[in-house]
């Protein structure tokens, strides 16, 4: 038997017990029981979607114990949420967040042009849960901010030449 349609309407190719609407191969215990389709294979397993008009192949799968997501052709990879492009990985290895043309290895564009942090790094556990730093935009100028363990702004380097230091020794 090469194909089976179960009483619940699931279709299986290469299995006698399809667990999804479309099951290819022999199923293990499903990780996501609400999945519409599943591919099972020992070792590496891939699904490839091909746009023959634009010669683009997108791959999703697993290999050597890792999840794989990417393109098989010389094409950028774009991630979407809410039907909008939010991140791009270019064929040269640049990553863009908020931009479709990242010019550096990490290129972040804040959606709000004023008073927004493009990058933040904070200690969320331990003795200083609010200490951190950020890069962003204030009054259409680039800034680097530092925050103490209470989350208070203690230093700001501003691209217009103004520097703010709140406490501590300089020099």
Image (cartoon, grey):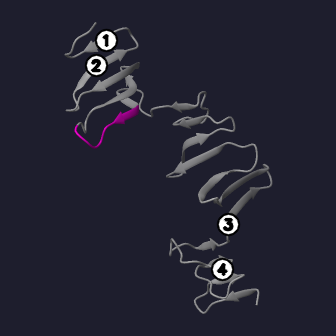
Mark 1 vs 4, N-terminal side: 4
Which residue matches tag 4? Answer: 26
Nearer the observer, disc 3 or disc 4? 3
Q: Residue drawn at (21%, 17%), measured in percent from left and top?
A: 166
Position in image of residue 145 (x %, y %):
33, 23
Instruction: Please say if 10 is above or below 155.
Output: below
Q: Secondary structure at mark 3?
A: loop
Question: Magenta part of the protein: which range?
Answer: 119-127
Q: Quadrant of residue 13?
A: bottom right
Residue nearer the viewer, 102 or 124: 124
| CA–CA distance in space, label 2 to label 4 | 59 Å
Residue named by callout 2: 155
CA gap, disc 1 and disc 4? 64 Å
Mark 3 and mark 1 lie on one chain; the one further toward the N terminus is 3
Residue wearing tag 1: 163
Real-space Cα separation, disc 2 to disc 1, in angstroms: 8 Å
Give the foreground label among 2 and 3: 3
In this view, the mark in front (3 or 1): 3
Q: Nearer the viewer, residue 136 or 104?
A: 104
Q: Earlier in the sequence, mark 2 or mark 4?
A: 4
Q: At x 63% / y 90%, what residue is drawn?
A: 6
For marks 3 and 4 on the same chain, the one whose residue lies earlier in the sequence: 4
Front-most of residues 70 and 112: 70
The residue pinned by badge 3 equals: 43
């Amino acid at each position: 038997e090469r194909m089976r349609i179960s009483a619940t309407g699931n279709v299986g190719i290469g299995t006698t017990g399809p667990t999804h609407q479309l099951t290819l191969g022999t199923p293990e215990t499903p990780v996501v029981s609400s999945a519409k389709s599943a591919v099972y294979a020992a070792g590496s397993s891939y699904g490839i979607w091909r746009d023959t008009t634009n010669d683009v192949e997108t791959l999703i799968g697993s290999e050597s114990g890792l999840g794989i997501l990417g393109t098989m052709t010389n094409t950028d990879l774009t991630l979407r949420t809410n039907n909008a492009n939010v991140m791009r990985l270019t064929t040269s290895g640049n990553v863009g967040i908020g931009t479709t043309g990242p010019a550096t290895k990490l290129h972040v564009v804040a959606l709000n042009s004023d008073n927004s942090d493009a990058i933040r790094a904070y200690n969320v556990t331990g003795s200083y849960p609010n200490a951190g730093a950020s890069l962003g935009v204030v009054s259409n100028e680039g800034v680097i901010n530092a925050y103490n363990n209470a989350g208070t702004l203690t230093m700001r380097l501003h691209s217009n030449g103004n520097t703010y230091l709140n406490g501590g020794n300089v020099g």
